[in-house]
Image: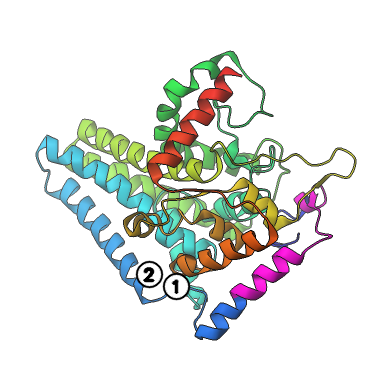
Amino acid sequence: MRIFPKFFSFFMTKISFNNTNKQFSSTLRTRVNDYFKAHRISNTGNRRLYLKSVILVATAVAGYVILVFFTPPVWLAILLCILFGCNLAAIGFNIMHEGGHQSFSKKGWLNLVSAYSLNMLGGTIYFWKQKHNIAHHTFTNVDGLDHDIDVKFMRMHADQPRKWFHRFQFAYWFVLYGISYIAWVAYQDFEKYFSGKMGVKADSKAMPLREHLIFWTTKITYFAVYLIIPILLVGWGPALLGWLIAGVACGFCLAVVFQLAHVVEATQFPLPDIDTNKIEQEWMVHQLSTTANFATGSKVVSWLLGGLNFQVEHHLFPRISHVHYPAINKLVKATCLEFNVVYLEHRTMGNAFASHLRHIYQLGRQ
C-alpha cells in the first residue's frame, strides 16, 4: 500500500500487503470520513491542542530557567530534572508527533514549526519522518523494516535470534529504555547522518544540503542550551548529572509508551510470504494485529501522551489529530466487530505494562 510515496519508496518494491479484499478498510475509511463531514470539523488539531501546547512549552521553559538560573536545593533540582525530562517527552508526544504527521494544524507552517520542535529536543525531524512515518507506520512490527523493534541487547519478538544475555533482559530492560533518548540524540542521529542509512538493512539515502545545515545548526544549539550554558552557570558536575537525569526520564517515557503499543503479548510480528514477498493481510488489518491500545478511558493519560494510548486509531489514520481519537475509536471498534477483525486493547496502563514485561521475559527464556 503506497501511503508515503515521497520517502523510502524502495521498501515498497520489497514487501507489499495482500490488498485483494479491501472491504474492511474501504468501509472504515468511509465511516471516518463521513464523521468529519457530518460534524463539519477538520481532522487536524483544535484550540484544545493549541492550549495544551502552550502549557507544555511554558512549563518546560520555566523548569529550565529555574534549574539553570536559580539553582534550587539538590532534592528539588533532582525532582525538577525528572519532571523536565517527562515534560520534554510530553512535548514530543503532543506537539512534535502531531506536526510530524501534519495533523497539528490545517496550516502547513504550524505543522512545520511543531515538527521541528524535535530538533530543539535534540533529535532530527528529517530522520524521524523516514524512520517513523515511513518505516514504522507502513511496516509495523515487520522485522528488518520497522527499526523501532530492533533494540540492541533486547529480543522483542520470536523471529529475532536469541542470545545468551537475553535470558536476563527482564532485569536490564529499564536501563536500555532509560538511556534510549541520550543514545538517540548523542549517537544514533550521528550514525544515521554519516552512514546515510536509517537502519542496518536500509539503503543509503542522499541528504539535501538544507538538511545538512539544519542538522548541524540544531545539534550545536541543543548541546549549547542543554549542556554548555548549564556547565558555565552551575558547574560540570551538576550540569552533567542534571542532563543525565532529565535524559533518562525522557527516554524511559518515550520507550515505554512505544513498547506498550506494539510489544505486548497479543500483538503480532508478521513475516512476508517467501515466494510472493507479501504479508497476507490488507494493510489496515495488519495495523490492527500489530498494535494495541491502553488506558483509553483515562483522560489524564490521553492528555499527557497526546492520545498515543489510542495507538490503534493513530496507526489506522496517522493524519488525524489525537483530539479526535475518542470519537474515531467507537467507529473502529464497531467496524472491527462487524468484520470479525481482532481489536487489541488493555484496560489500564498497568495491565499493558505487565503484559510487556511478561512478553520480554518469555522471549528471554524461549
Q: Position of residue 288 (x, y in %)?
A: 63, 52
Pick out the residue farthest to the top. 164
Q: Considering depth in this image, is 304 or 299 the residue closer to the camera?
A: 299
Q: Are marks 2 and 1 in contact (CB under 8 Å)?
A: yes
**From the viewer's perspective, is residue 101 above or below residue 43?**
above
Magenta range: 11-32
Q: Which type of secondary structure does the marked residue at label 2 adopt?
A: helix
- State left or right for residue 231 relative to residue 360: left
Residue drawn where x is 90% and y is 40% of the image: 275
76 to 36, vertically: above or below: above
Q: Is residue 7 visible?
A: no
Image position of 217 with respect to 276: above or below: below
Q: Where is residue 68 in the image (x, y as percent from the top left)?
A: 19, 47
Q: In which quarter of the image is the N terminus?
A: bottom right
Query: For the view shown, which residue lies furthest in the right direction?
Result: 275
Q: Where is residue 331 in the image (x, y as percent from the top left)?
A: 56, 68
The figure's colour scheme reads rainbow
Q: Which mark is residue 49?
A: 2
Crowdedness of circle 2 by 10 Å Cα count: few (<14), some, many (20+)?
many
Per the image, the residue denoted by label 1 is: 45
Q: Give the alpha-carbon distance from disc 2 to disc 1, as whole Å.
A: 6 Å
